[in-house]
Image (cartoon, rainbow, N blue to C red):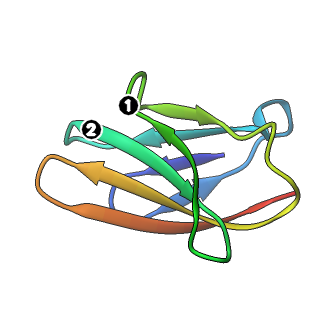
Amino acid sequence: LVIAGITGLWQKTDNQKNIIQIKNNSKIEKLTIIDYLGKAILTQNQNNNEINVENLSKGIYIIEIQLENEKVYKKFIKE
């Protein structure tokens, strides 16, 4: 699963279905996965170009991408 830029271009490949990759020109400071209840369940402050979601249950989640000057939110479905 790949997020490219702020526009949120998603691409899913079978061999990386548990990895979310973020490609962006700005520095990514932090990634946070939020569940449907609004609870932050996974936060990553290092290696912020990708995050492993293998241990998440199936469902709908939001990924919060903290950039240098803004936050971007994208919805994704864990299958």
Most distant residue in the bottom direction: 37
Most distant residue in the top direction: 47
Question: Residue 14 is drawn in which quadrant?
Answer: top right
Is residue 7 among the parts visible in the rendering?
no
Q: Disc 1 marks which amino acid?
A: Asn
72 left or right, relative to 34: left
Q: Residues within 10 Å of mark 2 (few under 14, many from 20)?
A: some
Q: Quadrant of the C terminus?
A: bottom right
18, above or below 41, in the image: above
Question: Which residue is located at x 57 percent, y 74 percent?
Answer: 38
Please tell me the numbered disc located at residue 29: 2
Residue marked by disc 1: 45
Most distant residue in the left direction: 69
SS label for mark 1: loop
Nearer to the camera, 13 or 40: 40
Image location (x, y in percent) of residue 48: 41, 31
**Do the residues bearing badges 1 and 2 touch, measured as CB atoms within 8 Å?**
yes
Question: Residue 28 is drawn in which quadrant?
Answer: top left
Question: Which residue is located at x 49 percent, y 42 percent?
Answer: 43
Image location (x, y in percent) of residue 68: 14, 46
Q: Residues within 10 Å of mark 1 (few under 14, many from 20)?
A: few
46, above or below 18, in the image: above
34 left or right, relative to 22: right
Count of labels in the image: 2
Q: Disc 2 marks which amino acid?
A: Glu
Is residue 31 among the parts visible in the rendering?
yes
Question: Which residue is located at x 65 percent, y 77 percent?
Answer: 37
SS label for mark 2: strand
- Going from the N terminus, do you reach mark 1 or mark 2 first? 2
